[in-house]
Amino acid sequence: MAYCDFTLRKVKTDLHLAVEENTSLFPEIQPIPPSDYLTFVLQEHLPLVTAINTEKARSELVVMPVLIEVRRYLQHQK
């Protein structure tokens, strides 16, 4: 089954899960604004992502630029 076919309701029912939504996983992490570069890239890619509309397109055109931005923010730490 493709990832896009999953729903939270189906997973909760099939796996007998309960979702706890009142817990902050990362309370000490402060948000940081995206760089001008990341904002530009995401704006450029959005029409393609919308037109192609596949998980692969989202991965390549949205997720990867965000990961590159995180790496840049961390000064290329390994």
Image (spheres, rainbow, N blue to C red):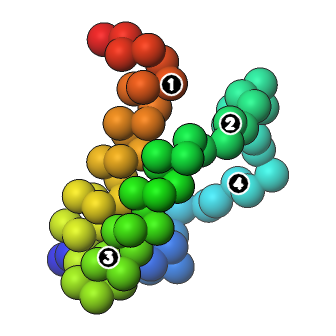
Q: Earlier in the sequence, mark 1 or mark 2?
A: 2
Query: Mark 4: few, some, or many residues within 10 Å (few <14, many ≥20)?
Result: few
Q: Label 1: which residue?
A: 73
The three-letter code of the residue at mark 3 reads Val
Rendered residue at 35%/48% (across/down): 65
Q: Label 3: which residue?
A: 49
Q: Point out the frontmost of discs 3 and 4.
A: 3
The three-letter code of the residue at mark 2 reads Ile
Q: Quick one: 25 or 16, which is closer to the camera?
A: 25
C-alpha separation, residue under disc 1 versus residue under disc 4: 31 Å
Q: Label 4: which residue?
A: 20
Q: Quick one: 29 or 42, which is closer to the camera?
A: 42
The three-letter code of the residue at mark 1 reads Tyr
Q: Quadrant of the C terminus?
A: top left
Q: Label 2: which residue?
A: 32
Task: Answer whether labels 1 and 2 touch (C-beta < 8 Å).
Answer: yes
Residue 71, x across and y down, in percent:
39, 26
C-alpha separation, residue under disc 2 versus residue under disc 4: 26 Å
C-alpha separation, residue under disc 1 versus residue under disc 2: 10 Å
Task: Answer whether labels 1 and 3 touch (C-beta < 8 Å).
Answer: no
SS for dot 1: helix
